[in-house]
Image (cartoon, grey):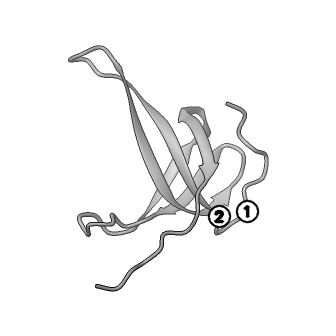
Amino acid sequence: MAIPNEIPANARVVVRVSEGVDPTDHRMKYRDYVGHVTAWDGHTLDMIRDAAANGSRPEHRVTIDADTIITLKPVPERHFTRP
């Protein structure tokens, strides 16, 4: 996949990265990150990963190496509904 040269700061994106082959089942493993871009220099993507919708994980900063990115695409903001 061709990764864009520019990614605007504060853009909300989903990034799929390769985690390599699982030694147990010998299948490729992937991880998805959804959050807001803080910086992109063409080699490293810095972003604030969104908190889990169910509250199981707080938001946190992640750094992703461009060589591990499989796909990257914009996603709309999460809508909050009040109980």
54 relative position to 78: left or right:
left
Residue in the picture at 25% in, 17% down: 23
For label 1, the crowd category at 10 Å Cα-Cα, with few meaning under 14, some 14 to 19 and many 20 or more, is: few
- Asked if residue 69 is positioned above or below residue 78 in the image, the reply reads above
Q: Are marks 2 and 1 in contact (CB under 8 Å)?
A: yes
Judging from the image, what secondary structure is the residue with disc 1 in? loop
Amino acid carrying label 2: it is Ala
- In the structure shown, which secondary structural element does the residue marked by tag 2 occupy? loop
- Residue under pointer 2: 11
> Identity of the amino acid at label 1?
Pro
Determine which residue is flagged by label 1.
Answer: 8
Q: How far apart are the two marked residues, 2 and 1, measured between alpha carbons?
A: 6 Å
Residue 20 sits in quarter? top left
Whether 45 is drawn above or below 36: the answer is above
Residue drawn at (37%, 67%) of the image: 51
Residue 15, x across and y down, in percent: 53, 46
